[in-house]
Amino acid sequence: MTSLLPPRAPGPRASDRTQARPSDRRRRPLALVASLGGVAAALAPLLVLAAVGIVGWFAADAGAHGVPRDGMRIGALAWLMGHGSGVTVQGAPVGIVPLGVTAMAAWAMWRLGHRVGDAVSGHGPDADRIADGERDFTVPAAVSLFFVGYAVVAVVVSSLAAGADTSFSTAAVLRWSLVMTLVVAAPAIAIGSGRAAIWAAVAPPVVRDGVGAALSVLGWFLAVSGAAFVVALLVGAGEAATMMSQLHLSAGEAIVYSLVNAGLAPNAVLFSGSFLLGPGFAVGGGTMVSPGVVVLGPLPLLPLLAALPSAGPTAAWVASLVGIPALVAALATAWWQRRRPTVRWDHGALRGCGGGIVAGVAFAVLASVAGGVAGPGRMQHVGPFVADVLVHAIAAFGLGGLVGGLFMTWRQRRRAAGGALDSAG
């Protein structure tokens, strides 16, 4: 990022004036760095999953059946499903995305994207030239080439993992890869290259603080949803143990099956958040799990499902949980504004309400990818009720954020008035 800083004044010697800047000497080809970054971001989680697949293959029956390549193929299928490929095994469709795998891929994409941004920061105009209006295509070019490298790996993996008994959508993998590149890698590259700081300086402060408030609300609510899921799973721990015993798994198979459940844990957190918001979710056709009523049917032996409440009308205290999202939004907004004080009522209101609305839309988007087809028959309908979740999230987060923003503005105005009186005294 040194290339974005104003150039140093020339030294007294002619050799110093003609010497190239260190960033110029270390400049690497943008095309090479960005494309290899995309390849590395795709391969990092893929290799981990392939290794887990081999360990699972050997742990299942000590390698008595099949070859190590079968375990690697299972890891590749998990990577593809984490990118929205879906899979059909002997006519049985499974379209639900294991968001644990997606989160692993997104983390690798963020880390590698940040490194790519730092490596290409010397390309293009510096901060002064950008401020003067000169066009800078460094980040768009790096993002495009990063996606090309990532997509090449995706296509190769899809061709190698294909089999006679399984099918999946390569086009869906490429769509997910593109969206993840734009949502995760592009901001990472912009931050690593220093361009994000330049662009953010142009945005009004209330917009920057509103985005920060939205991230705060979303992060706090996901944490609360995760805590609620863990508590529910601990309450149903006995039922989860019973499910595992009914499967008659060996020790190695139990470990592998636990890893499969761990890959679906983020999905369960989003289901939990949809429950707290009120609309709830479905775990099969004709079912509903919400704070008001729970309607269930036959369920697969999946230990994560032990967190589900019992069927029938719920207790009165369970229905009161719908107040948690607004409370979380208010506290998260107040916490954020404590670090970004303001004495203007309109700024406090816009930060809180606008940030809450953005957080509500973001949570609904996440909830929309948490569900999907989990098998044939009635299990084709699994997931949150996204349209209702969107409405409830916008209302709860927007109202809670507004209250939190105005309350903290009131406190900061009082503190500012008190400080002015002390100075006058």
Image (cartoon, rainbow, N blue to C red):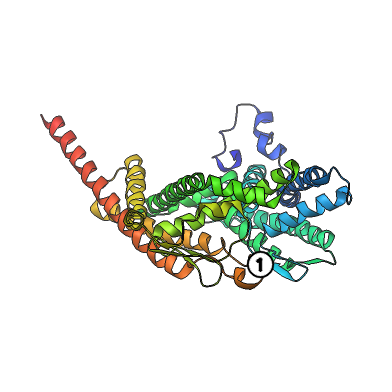
Number of marks in the rendered image: 1
Residue 123 visible here: no
Q: Give the percent coordinates (x, y) of residue 9.
A: 56, 33
Between 380 and 185, the one lying in front of the other is 380
Query: Is 419 placed left or right of 149 in the picture?
Result: left
Between 246 and 384, the one lying in front of the other is 246
Specify the quadrant that holds the N terminus: top right
For badge 1, the amino acid type reads Gly
Crowdedness near tag 1: few (<14), some (14–19) or many (≥20) residues, C-alpha within 10 Å: many
Q: Give the percent coordinates (x, y) of residue 233.
A: 51, 47
In the image, is residue 306 above or below residue 174? above
Specify the quadrant that holds the C terminus: top left
Q: Who's the residue at 63% across and 65% down the image?
A: 374
Query: Is 40 placed left or right of 209 in the picture?
Result: right
Residue found at the far left of this picture: 425
Residue 325 visible here: yes
Query: Is 47 placed left or right of 289 in the picture?
Result: right
Q: Quadrant of residue 277?
A: bottom left
Q: Give the percent coordinates (x, y) of residue 403.
A: 27, 53
* Label 1 SS: loop
Residue ID for mark 1: 375
Q: Who's the residue at 59% across and 62% down the image?
A: 299
Q: Give the percent coordinates (x, y) of residue 28.
A: 73, 43
Q: Who's the residue at 55% across and 72% down the image?
A: 285
In the image, is residue 381 above or below residue 347? below
Between 36 and 175, the one lying in front of the other is 175
